[in-house]
Amino acid sequence: MLDPDELLDLAESIKTAGLLEDIVLDTDGILLDGRNRLAACEIAGVEPRFTTYTGDNPRALIFSNNVVRRHLTKGQQAMITAMACSFSGHSLRGLARTHGLSRSRLSAANVVLKYAPDLAEQVRIGAFPLDAAYEAALESKAKIAAMQEKQGRLDQHAPDLAKQVSEGRLTLDEAIATLAERQEQTRIRKEITDADVLRKADGHMTPPLAQLAEQGDITWTQAHQQAEEYVAQRRTVIHETQQAIEQAAQHWTTIRAQMPRPGTALAREFHAGLSPEAGELITHLTALA
């Protein structure tokens, strides 16, 4: 409906120039188009003139007539058109071309209609701007997507928790938090088990950390800490040893070329100037060569 001032202006126009466009009823006498003109006629004291719609798509008539009203904003026109599209099956592109509206504005209205239907009606009647409604609808869309993603995780990894959510015994966020705790515990226990496998392969004879945690001799947190420390120390030892071997290899060609024959005075003097560790290394390397 027009606001009171606009309605009075329309009434004055009808009183002066007459009713220029018939008020449309369906075959049952239900008003399809012209409620502002009908109200203005009553105000102006002018006898309204009616015509009967005999087509088969009264909704299309209502929306096509109302979307081109001059007093509607582009946002209202876009929303009315998107609403029409929702039940008419027409494409947004076709309706945009027909009514001279931008596709981006129609798309925004469609998003509002889908994700914030309460605001869609407010946009239609001009009580809320389309741009603000669109921003709110995008937030709603993001929240829905996040909820769907969480529900999908539960369905895939924790059907029992998903069932509790559907039964109302857990909220979605509570179930997701429980799933995260489970997954964290699974990760920790796997890292402990992997460390135990390495310890056994490295020749350690002490009981596995997982066994100690199961028995209650240590907590799972302590077992995880020891597992992390063992893996880190093992990695460091391997790296430092590899570096030392690479350094020795870089000089071995020179050492082997200058090595005197065993048992000679030169060989004895050569060894005499070395530390016990270096002498042992030379003895081993010479034997291998």
Image: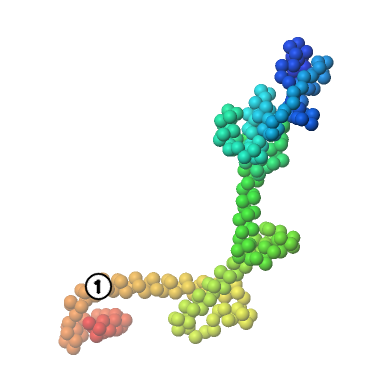
The residue positioned 77% from the left and 30% from the top of the image is 27
Task: Give the percent coordinates (x, y) of residue 85.
Answer: 63, 37
Q: Is residue 11 left or right of residue 74?
A: right
The quarter of the picture where residue 243 lies is bottom left
Q: Nearer the viewer, residue 172 or 74?
A: 74
Q: 76 or 92: which is nearer to us?
A: 92
Query: Which residue is at 69% across, 38% downward?
Result: 120
Categorize mark 1 by other alpha carbons within 10 Å: few (<14), some (14-19), many (20+).
Answer: few
Identity of the residue drawn at 78% across and 13% down:
15
Left or right for 262, reference 192: left
Q: Position of residue 97 (x, y in %)?
A: 56, 30
Place residue 119 in its image quadrant: top right
Q: Secondary structure at mark 1?
A: helix
> Residue 262 placed where, x, y %?
19, 86
**232 up-or-down from 88: above or below:** below
Provide the residue designation for mark 1.
Answer: 251
Task: Please identify the quadrant where the C terminus is shown.
Answer: bottom left
The part of the image, by quadrant, that contains residue 250 is bottom left
Quadrant of the image for the N terminus?
top right
Q: Which one is in front, 248 or 270?
A: 248
**Residue 225 x, y percent position in the rendering:** 55, 72
Color theme of the render: rainbow
> Does residue 44 show up?
no
